[in-house]
Image (spheres, grey):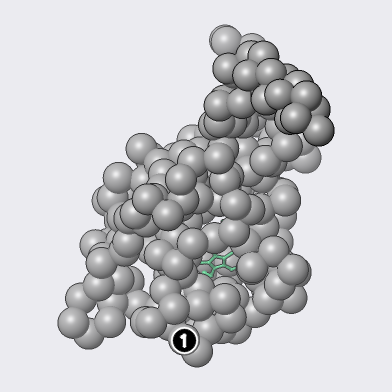
Amino acid sequence: MKNKNAFMLATVLLLPATTVFAVPKNDININNEKIVRASFQTDGSVNLPTDFHHWVHVGTFVKESGINIFDNSKIDAPLIGNSYIEPSAYRYFMATGKWADGSQIVKEFTVAENGDNCDKNTHICKTSLGSAIFQEKYTGYGYMVKDQKRFPQFAGNWAFFTTGNIAPPYPKTAKVESVSQCSACHIAHASDQDFVFAAQKIGLDRSSPNNK
Ligand code: HEC
């Protein structure tokens, strides 16, 4: 028995230090992670973030037709959406697979070039640089804020805001959008993901070695 214990101790001590002590990058100490929160006006309007291009870009998608969800207008040229996660919320999600209270997410639309040099069906434009679909301009963003104390009434405590379908400079504040305008669709299609389309974003794939 004594010998067996000595053998086990020797085995443990012989393990390379990296095996025993290495901490994968995603195993951050989430208890120390202070989530950076949104700020609000006294009337409940949110102060829209202005620095979200410095957040973590986690995915792009193209909406080719239908309506623009920011103002229900008809889409003429494809909308290219880019999603950004506030970095502390991103780190928390990548470590745990959960959205921390205070998480902030932006999805900004850009509109694709739509001139006479562009094919009306494929939206590919011929230019001296070659043929491609090009982003032409920014056209507003949607903003989700998870806040249990402030929004106990909403699914997942997520409040939805938008600048509307406009070019920058964007407004500084926004009021909470109605459930029918925004969250109803997230409730219908992403209630199994805490109302965020995380599985649809390549940058939020926690199993990808490229996201470590
Ligand atoms: C008809 C359904 C629908 C409506 C209405 C809708 N969304 Fe979304 N929303 C989506 C889908 C689908 C995605 C995922 C797109 C992608 O892959 O990035 C998304 C993504 C988002 C994201 C990025 C985080 C995520 O869940 O992927 C934000 C932020 C967002 N929507 C805000 C809004 C706001 C604000 C409104 C209202 C003005 C709104 N949405 C209305 C379907 C909807």
Q: Quadrant of residue 183?
A: bottom right
Left or right of 206: which side holds 113?
Answer: left
In the depicted view, which residue is nearer to us: 39 or 66?
Answer: 39
Residue appearing at x 22%, y 85% in the figure: 43
In the depicted view, which residue is nearer to us: 178 or 157?
Answer: 157
Q: Secondary structure at mark 1?
A: loop
Question: Which residue is outermost to the bottom?
Answer: 153
Left or right of 170: which side holds 88?
Answer: right
Quadrant where the C terminus sits is: top right
Image vertical order of residue 155 relative to residue 61, above or below: below
Q: Quadrant of residue 17?
A: top right
Residue appearing at x 28%, y 77% in the figure: 45
Q: Kindly identify the amino acid type of the residue bearing the numbered disc 1.
A: Pro
Is residue 42 visible in the rendered structure shown here?
Answer: yes
Residue appearing at x 43%, y 82% in the figure: 151
Q: Position of residue 156 (x, y in %)?
A: 57, 76
Q: Residues within 10 Å of mark 1 (few under 14, many from 20)?
A: few
Q: Quadrant of ligand 1?
A: bottom right
Q: Position of residue 204 (x, y in %)?
A: 63, 43
Residue appearing at x 63%, y 19% in the figure: 13
| Residue that badge 1 annotates | 152
Quadrant where the N terminus sits is: top right
Q: Position of residue 120 (x, y in %)?
A: 72, 39
In the depicted view, which residue is nearer to us: 192 or 57?
Answer: 192
Is residue 108 visible in the rendered structure shown here?
Answer: no
